[in-house]
Image (cartoon, rainbow, N blue to C red):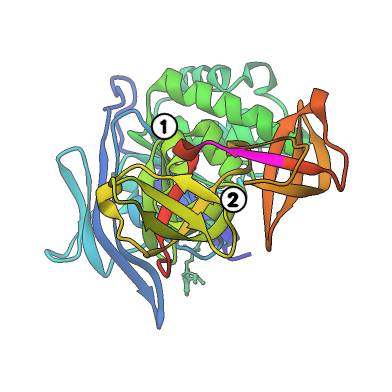
Amino acid sequence: MRGDPIAITGFFELAVGTGRWLDYAPLMGTVRAAGLVKTFGTVGAVNDLSFEARAGEFLTLLGPSGCGKTTTLRLVAGLERPDRGEIHVGDRPLSSAASGLFVPPERRGMGMVFQSYAIWPHMTVFENVAFPLQELRVPRAEIRERVMTILATVGLGDLHGRPAPMLSGGQQQRVALARALVSNPQVLLLDEPLSNLDARLREEMRFELRDMQAKLGITSIFVTHDQAEAMTLSDRIVVMNAGRIEQEGSPEDVYQRPTTRFVMDFLGRANHLPARIVRADDGSCMAEVEDSGFCMPLGGLDAWQDGQEVLLAFRPEAVEARAAERDGVWVGVVRSSVYVSGHVEYVVDLGKFTVRATGPEEARLPHDTRARLCVSPRAVRVWPRGRP
Ligand SMILES: Nc1ncnc2c1ncn2[C@@H]1O[C@H](COP(=O)(O)OP(=O)(O)OP(=O)(O)O)[C@@H](O)[C@H]1O
Ligand SMILES: [Mg+2]
């Protein structure tokens, strides 16, 4: 895996933080990246990326494999030099391609945890976490105090003497976190740190990580391709695609109000129906689903022209399937249904389209029966067709 050797070197460089331990209080750093570009040969990994992780914030870079998340994090850490663009923490410039400024990783005051935690098997928990401080020749008594404090914070206080190989995956992950935090970094960078854990532990660690981050108030940039992880952990999410930002916002924003089809599809399941705008003489405006009589009233009237082709996009939970006696508008046929934690999810044939819908478990509709689809217009996104 490409990450392994890099992970270890990266850690050595980063963990050997900024020097003064006893009186070092973490500054609340805002990380600002502006116009970052990074190309490897002919591969454009990061393409004009600008974002801000505000002081104390938990910011997530979310996107599919290969979209440039790790590269972005490594640019922030100083493990890569940008071809273009600038990085600041607070007022302090760390990297500027234009002026040639480049602060090396060990002087950036950042802690980093990688997907492969890269903890050392021949050392105990204590020794693993103490290592960065020993490298800096911090006095022994101070090392002991700092290490025990951070181990207590990550819930490993009782295990300080245990050899690293005798730890569970979750415990190893916590050692890696403690080691990244022991130097009181200003910023914490996390590259898919939970992806090696099994599903249940991963979920548990999500909450622990979030708790701890909030307690420490440390500005954190977290990288994942897992939308559920991003939704539960983040103050804000930057959705990336092919080296660029598609959208950024709160988890609710990007989930409920996606601005592109890519974001809509990447963050969850979605229905997409091609439709045409129909404007009435009184100025009201409807979207009529193609080749059917299904209409939906629209807001934002000025945005649309009569006859314009659009795409209606909405999530399954925005459509409720109810029993229907007769054929009619928005009436389809139930093709399949599954029970999912407290409600039923349906696949309904609606004319030539298939719509995913939901309904209450106590009124589950049998297969091949008619279902009326009640769509909440407020939850429908309308995009000009042909837009990505
Ligand atoms: N050192 C490198 N040399 C050549 N190409 C690279 C290098 N690092 C990254 N790339 C390429 O840059 C692009 C972005 O890679 P990156 O590792 O940042 O993606 P990612 O979003 O972290 O993906 P994943 O979710 O799979 O970890 C990919 O096409 C990758 O192959
Ligand atoms: Mg990656």
Q: What residue type is labelled 2?
A: Ala
Q: For the residues carrying marks 2 and 1, which lies nearer the camera in this image?
A: 2
Considering every residue shown, the one lying at the far front of the view is: 281
Quarter holding residue 26: top left
Q: Which of 245 and 375 is in front in this view?
A: 375
Mark 2 surroundings: few (<14), some (14-19) or many (≥20) residues within 10 A: some
Residue 168 in percent (x, y) is at 76, 34
Q: Position of residue 108 (x, y in %)?
A: 29, 45
What amino acid type is highlighted by mark number 1? Asp
Q: Is mark 1 on a helix, strand or loop?
A: loop
Seen at 40% across and 83% down, the residue is: 42
User: Toward the viewer: 293 or 250?
Assistant: 293
Q: Quadrant of the N terminus?
A: bottom right
Which secondary structure is most common in the magenta stretch?
strand
- Residue 217 figure quarter: top left
Instruction: Identify residue for label 2.
Output: 270
From what the image shows, is residue 227 above or below residue 72?
above
Q: Which residue is tagged 1?
A: 235
Q: Position of residue 25 (x, y in %)?
A: 30, 22
